[in-house]
């Protein structure tokens, strides 16, 4: 989605950031648990012999040698995320958060303790978890050390083209595009939208990574999530009033439990992971200055929320997508004028909502979404009718257990696409194109493993507004 605020809102929020910083500095002394600030590096600058990679391999080997009952073992750590191992489960298994507002914070906590365990198990006290910077065209392939079949970082449980050396498979640019999330002002939208490129990477790496219950068995998982975590920092650092939901007591009140490097359980709340460098002693190579957000503030403007007004729920037969593009004409009826006005406005988002999305098993492909594509025109993700993409990862996949809802839903900003179609007096078609990775630089023919069902299609008006809720009063 495009970046979306008017000048007045921008000035207001600059004021908010300034006052928050003042309150933070005068009232709080950050709790440092260690003197060192670890730097999480871009794996693109590392090789198989870099200390970060050598130590990681040492730790993975040591962790894999431990029994699954040991919290420091590879199997136990992966199971904290999710597992297929038989249950009743040891404590704190199957915790991962997807499709919830805890997605960023839960995974941050998880990586933080994983990193401490790797530090201990590798004996490398300076180790920090690198990140796979998959938005870069230069890092659109699985990093080479993970594709070396002699390395413990290799697994055969991946898409074979992605896993080959040299790799024939690569992540397409449209799949790793984070601009929708980055453009969102409100946290709820950003944490939802970031899960789209995140999920695309899971599904396109394939194999274990494509399924929640096995994803964290693949050593690449943690480098992938290091990048997702970095994107949280980058989202905040854009300013414009973006902030963590520190006035939302459901969010701030939530705690999760992990194990530290001594095997002792440790419990963190979302308020403990707001400031990576201050609270958790790490920063990312090349990231902008981290924003220090706090749960306790005296001066704070109400946060941004995306206020959504449903316009129309489109009736019709349920959509089923297999290997072929699916097209359906969106009929706006009496709402045509209103939709046209919103589409042309720069203050409001015209949103296409796809909901009740399910598949019997992981379809193994991603889906591109186009709106207003002229008849006969080939769908091109670089064109103006491409409004985004999605994959199913967890929610919506019926043979997987996980937390969160049983179906998936996704929202796409369609102002430009609808505006262009209506101005050209064309029918507004919705086109869903199953799409895989690039093989030898060319889009692969999708081989879908399950039919995608979309049960609900609607149009809505979205407005980024200051919520009425007032200031936070507790937390740290
Ligand atoms: Cu909890 Cu990327 O998965």
Image (cartoon, rainbow, N blue to C red):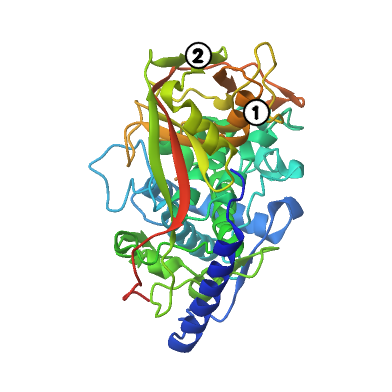
> Disc 2, disc 1: CB below 8 Å?
no
Q: Residues within 10 Å of mark 1 (few under 14, many from 20)?
A: many
Q: Quadrant of the C terminus?
A: bottom left
Residue 216 drawn above or below residue 376: below
User: In terms of image quadrants, where is residue 40?
Assistant: bottom right
Quarter of the figure with the N terminus? top right
Q: Quadrant of residue 438?
A: top right
206 or 448: which is nearer to us? 448
Q: Residue furthest bottom?
A: 26
Q: Against 166, is 233 above or below?
A: below
Q: Which mark is residue 322?
A: 2
* Residue occupying the point 51% across, 54% down: 62
Residue shown at 41% from the left, 69% from the top: 272
Q: Is residue 418 shown left or right of residue 44?
A: left
- Where is residue 130 drawn, in percent x and y? 63, 56
Can I make out residue 378 in this image?
Answer: yes
Residue at position x 61%, y 17% from top? 426
Q: CA distance from mark 2 to mark 1?
A: 28 Å
Residue 126 percent across, percent down from the top left = 61, 70
First along the sequence among labels 2 and 1:
2
**Residue 24 in the image: x percent, y percent?**
47, 81
Q: Is residue 81 left or right of residue 435?
A: left
Pick the residue in front: 455 or 351. 351
The residue beneath circle 1 is 420
409 sits left or right of 267 in the view:
right
């Amino acid at each position: 989605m495009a970046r979306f605020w008017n000048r007045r809102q921008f000035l207001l929020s600059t004021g908010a950031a300034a006052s928050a910083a003042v309150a933070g500095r005068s009232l709080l002394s950050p709790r440092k648990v260690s003197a060192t600030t670890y730097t999480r590096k871009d794996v693109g600058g590392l090789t198989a012999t870099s200390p970060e990679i050598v130590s990681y391999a040492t730790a993975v080997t040591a962790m894999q040698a431990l029994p699954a009952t040991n919290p420091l073992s590879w199997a136990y750590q992966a199971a904290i995320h999710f597992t297929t191992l038989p249950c009743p489960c040891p404590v704190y298994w199957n915790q991962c958060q997807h499709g919830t507002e805890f997605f960023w914070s839960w995974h941050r906590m998880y990586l933080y303790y994983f990193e401490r365990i790797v530090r201990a198990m590798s004996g490398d006290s300076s180790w920090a978890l690198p990140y796979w910077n998959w938005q870069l065209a230069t890092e659109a392939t699985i990093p080479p050390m993970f594709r070396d079949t002699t390395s413990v970082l290799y697994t055969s449980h991946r898409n074979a083209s992605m896993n080959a050396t040299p790799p024939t498979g690569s992540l397409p640019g449209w799949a790793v595009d984070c601009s929708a999330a980055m453009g969102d002002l409100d946290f709820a939208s950003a944490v939802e939208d970031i899960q789209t490129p995140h999920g695309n990477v899971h599904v396109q790496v394939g194999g274990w990574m494509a399924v929640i219950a096995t994803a964290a068995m693949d050593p690449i998982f943690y480098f992938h999530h290091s990048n997702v975590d970095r994107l949280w920092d980058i989202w905040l650092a854009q300013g414009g009033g973006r902030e963590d939901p520190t006035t939302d007591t459901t969010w701030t009140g939530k705690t999760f439990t992990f194990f530290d490097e001594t095997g002792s359980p440790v419990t963190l709340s979302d308020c403990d992971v707001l400031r990576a460098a201050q609270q958790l002693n790490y920063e990312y190579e090349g990231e902008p200055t981290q924003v220090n957000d706090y749960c306790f503030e005296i001066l704070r403007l109400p946060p941004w929320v995306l206020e959504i007004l449903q316009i129309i729920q489109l009736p019709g037969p349920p959509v089923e997508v297999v290997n072929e593009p699916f097209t359906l004409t969106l009929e706006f009826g009496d709402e045509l004028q209103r939709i046209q006005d919103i589409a042309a406005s720069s203050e409001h988002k015209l949103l296409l909502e796809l909901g009740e999305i399910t598949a019997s098993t992981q379809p193994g492909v991603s889906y591109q979404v186009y709106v207003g594509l002229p008849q006969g025109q080939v769908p091109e993700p670089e064109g103006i009718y491409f409004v985004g993409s999605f994959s199913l990862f967890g929610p919506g996949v019926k043979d997987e257990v996980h937390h969160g809802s049983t179906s998936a839903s996704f929202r796409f900003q369609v102002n430009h696409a609808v505006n262009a179609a209506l101005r050209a007096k064309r029918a507004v078609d919705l086109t869903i194109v199953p799409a895989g990775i690039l093989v030898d630089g060319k889009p692969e023919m999708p081989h879908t493993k399950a039919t995608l069902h979309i049960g609900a299609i609607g149009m809505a008006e979205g407005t980024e507004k200051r919520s009425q809720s007032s200031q936070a009063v507790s937390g740290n």
